[in-house]
Image: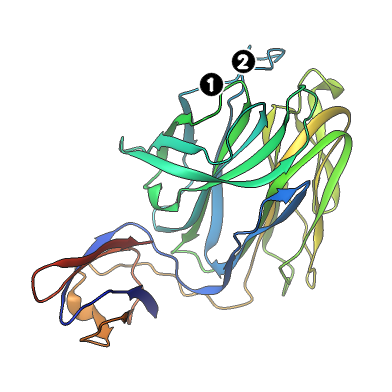
Amino acid sequence: MKKIISTLASILLFMAYVIAQPGSIENTNHSINNHHDVNTHTLQMAFDTTACGLNYTQATSVITTRYNAYSNSTFGHGFPDTLTITALPANYSIAKAYIYFAESYTTACTTPIVTFSDPGGNTHNAGATLQGIDGPVCWSEVGTYGFRADVTNSITTNGNYILDSISCTSVWEIDGVTLLIIYQDLSAAYQGTFVIYDGCIGVTGGTESTKVSGFNICQTPLTGRGFVISGDFQDNVMNGVHVGIINNDSIFFPSRFFNFDDTTANFVAGQISTQMGASSSGDCFLVAALGIYYTDNCIQCPSITSVPNNIQLSDFTVNPNPTSGLINILSSQAFNKTIHLSLVNVLGQEIINQTWN
């Protein structure tokens, strides 16, 4: 059963209009979204969710123009930059979407605005939250920042998301960006678990390894993956490769200055923690985020293969009505939709106009 709660200033009686649009998370076993304080030289849990059909996709790009020794191109892409999403299935619901980026800064602010357009050409402005800070890595800058912008309500479909700008900074200082989309495949029968840690850790040659917990593997997973988002690895150092630490294993990845190092991971039944990070003995680098993902059949997940063609007001119950405060809006069935709700009082005044994913 889906439950939506809103606080209203004053409603006596109302009419509700429900419009169906793409997206909504269902069948969640547990879900934690932490908004932790700014970290210094550390990573902390930011997301921990288990749900039926949970999965993820991403697009990553180099932005910076301060490093010009690439073997394949002279500079990063700068702005505008295109992030292409192709893996969203036919029957999906967006659970959470983030834009991650890292900076080696001189005078950059701590509250930048990310401006981008979706595949339909609609422009979005998302405030980025500073997740972590650390000292400079190799560039004689003041220090390093790790940012995360919540863009969940701006993800519409597969296609090109064009990043136009990040305010109060420069393309010289931004290493790169990752658009990370966590979604439910509503036609899938598996259960997925996804855990993210973020912040900022700068390393001047050596190893950064973070203990990731917050999960308890009930059986040998059907699939497993791990990823690390890192910046500043140069492809003219260490033969153009660096080490990613994925589920305690050291794996070589190409150095692209801003990296989403993602690979399979062999998790085991009963596992409750793992080590994740990166390493290079001859290069400076930073880690902005990392995470693990696995699927299992520990619970029976009902796939949602059909959606009602017409969603009616009668599909919902509302209580208390009338009310002057809290209102509960309940649906007895799952909708593969975003719910757009308009509440109007007896005077014809619109009290709420809101969309829930």
Q: Mark 2 points at which residue?
A: 75
Amino acid carrying label 1: it is Gly
Task: Give the Cα distance between marks 2 and 1.
Answer: 8 Å
Q: Report the colour scheme.
A: rainbow
Whole-percent x, y for residue 311 in the image: 21, 70
Residue under numbered circle 1: 78
Q: Is residue 164 left or right of residue 296?
A: left
**Residue drawn at 55 percent across, 28 percent down:** 169
Amino acid of disc 2: Phe
Residue 141: x, y in percent?
73, 25
Task: Using residue 279 as the reference point, say whether residue 351 is left or right of it.
Answer: left
Helix, strand or loop for disc 2:
loop
Residue drawn 73% across and 70% down? 217
| Label 1 crowd (10 A; few <14 / some 14-19 / many >=20) | many
Relative placement, left or right, of 44 versus 33 is: right
* Residue 38 pos. (x, y %): 67, 51
**Tag 1's secondary structure?**
loop
In which quadrant of the rendered view does residue 230 lie?
A: top right
